[in-house]
């Protein structure tokens, strides 16, 4: 039964990112369907990401005070409904509003699943479990555009109807797996919820984790966001198929390396694994300046993905151990911070890229990796001391 519980968590982690990135493969179809330009279609990404990042601040805390199962089930249902609304949208306005509902739904699911995984695992195997969870998320990110591209050959609406059905199924599977399982809750009023968030935000280790999470996603998404344009320009002039394979190599690395990284977290420690991940990522961003061939970029993006797998497996594990009695709240704060990094990266770095080159983006990413090594060493949580 425990295996079914963990599997239901991994399935939930996989489904959320499917819809978040799927829109990248649907740009031509959505432009044609709504009669808009690419900029308006791409607004659907922040319309999903900002409510997703912001509302996570509260969902995990609510799950600490009330029943985690109820919060997750509500999230799956809202996500399913939002995806269905995307599928029946007749205007860009309705589509963007539906994306807000999608982001809201998964904001109720994502941090609570992490907290539940922390609840049902032990210190000895938590890193491995978080590694596989990271692999499930990465698989969703990587496969979202692929699945969407295939279904869009029939109709772009089928993409969102499919994701709606998958979310409904995942919710039912989760509820069945956790039938009879109860979580300790604190109850209380909305004021108690806000006080708990305030308590967590006053914890130095949580602030450090949130800062690192924001910076890591900021750097990762910054590199990935502009890589496609850079590779298509002279002197490289790569084809779309080649660019897709290069970008996919990073996602493939995450799927493969995340379980290995999780095992390393349990074996050599949280901080050491994170440090190695930052060193690999930083070194990759130095070496990529000298890449000039398709195979070199594939190899280096794969290596970059491996480094990030080590980072996330470590940080997710530490987040569950800093304040064990408030796992949901810590998960909310940490995940909210890192996904704000995801949301802000393209917005902040567009003028930097336009005014200079992608090499400056690489330099920023390398600097973030080195700074993060210093920050992760400063985390002094009781359960992770000396790790």
Image: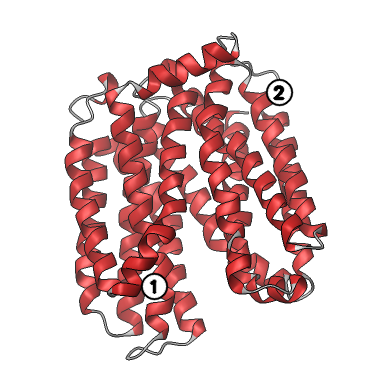
The total of numbered circles placed on residues is: 2
Q: Nearer the viewer, residue 171 or 345?
A: 345
Residue 85 position, x and y percent, is: 79, 52
Asked whether, in this view, residue 242 is left or right of residue 68, the answer is left
Secondary structure at badge 1 equals helix
The crowd level at tag 1 (other Cα within 10 Å; few <14, some 14-19, many 20+) is some
Label 2 sits on residue: 179
Q: Nearer the viewer, residue 197 or 170?
A: 197
Residue contact at pointers 2 and 1, CB within 8 angstroms: no
**Which residue occupies 39% across, 37% down?**
316
Q: In this view, does 328 lie above or below 268?
A: above
Tag 1 or tag 2, which sits nearer the N-term?
Answer: 2
Q: Which of 1 and 277 is in front in this view?
A: 277
Residue 383 position, x and y percent, is: 28, 21
Quadrant for the N terminus in the image: top right
Q: Distance between the residues labelled 2 and 1?
A: 45 Å
The answer to whether one can see residue 17 in this image is no
State the mark number for residue 127.
none
Residue 14 position, x and y percent, is: 58, 49
Residue 147 position, x and y percent, is: 65, 65
Tell me the quarter of the picture where residue 353 sits: bottom left
Q: In this view, does 30 lie above or below 70?
A: below
State the mark number for residue 227.
1
**Which residue occupies 42% across, 84% down?**
232
Tell me the quarter of the picture where residue 237 sits: bottom left
The crowd level at tag 2 (other Cα within 10 Å; few <14, some 14-19, many 20+) is few
Q: Nearer the viewer, mark 2 or mark 1?
A: 1
**Which residue occupies 66% across, 70% down?**
26
Secondary structure at badge 2 equals loop
**Which residue occupies 37% across, 24% down?**
201
Asked whether, in this view, residue 82 is left or right of residue 344, the answer is right
């Amino acid at each position: 039964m425990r295996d079914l519980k963990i599997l239901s968590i991994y399935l939930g982690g996989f489904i959320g990112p499917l819809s978040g990135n799927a829109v990248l493969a649907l740009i031509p179809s959505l432009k044609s369907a709504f009669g808009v330009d690419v900029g308006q279609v791409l607004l659907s990404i922040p319309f999903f990401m900002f409510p997703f990042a912001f509302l996570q601040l509260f969902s995990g805390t609510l799950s600490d005070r009330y029943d985690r199962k109820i919060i997750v089930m509500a999230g799956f249902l809202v996500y399913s409904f939002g995806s269905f609304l995307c599928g029946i949208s007749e205007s860009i306005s309705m589509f963007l509003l539906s994306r807000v509902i999608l982001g809201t739904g998964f904001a109720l699911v994502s941090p609570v699943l992490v907290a539940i995984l922390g609840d049902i695992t032990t210190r000895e195997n938590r890193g491995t479990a978080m590694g596989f969870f990271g692999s499930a998320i990465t698989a969703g990110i990587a496969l979202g555009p692929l699945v969407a591209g295939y279904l869009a050959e029939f109709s772009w609406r089928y993409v969102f109807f499919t994701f709606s059905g998958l979310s409904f199924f995942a919710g039912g599977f989760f509820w069945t797996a956790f039938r009879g399982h109860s979580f300790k809750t604190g109850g209380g009023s909305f004021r108690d919820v806000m006080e708990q968030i305030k308590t967590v935000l006053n914890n130095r280790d949580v602030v450090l984790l949130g800062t690192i999470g924001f910076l890591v996603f900021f750097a990762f998404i910054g590199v990935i966001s502009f890589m496609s344009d850079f590779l298509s320009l002279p002197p490289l002039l790569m084809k779309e198929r080649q660019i897709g394979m290069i970008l996919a190599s990073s996602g493939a690395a995450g799927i493969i390396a995340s379980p290995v990284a999780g095992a390393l977290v349990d074996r050599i420690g949280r901080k050491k694994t994170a440090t190695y991940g930052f060193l690999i990522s930083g070194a990759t961003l130095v070496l990529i300046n000298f890449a000039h061939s398709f195979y070199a970029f594939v190899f280096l993006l794969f290596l970059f993905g491996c480094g990030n797998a080590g980072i996330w497996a470590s940080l997710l594990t530490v987040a569950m151990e800093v304040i064990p009695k408030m796992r949901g709240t810590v998960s909310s704060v940490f995940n909210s911070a890192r996904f704000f990094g995801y949301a802000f990266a393209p917005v902040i770095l567009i003028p930097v890229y336009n005014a200079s080159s992608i090499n400056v983006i690489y330099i920023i990413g390398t600097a973030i990796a080195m700074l993060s090594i210093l920050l992760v060493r400063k985390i002094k949580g009781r359960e992770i001391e000396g790790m």
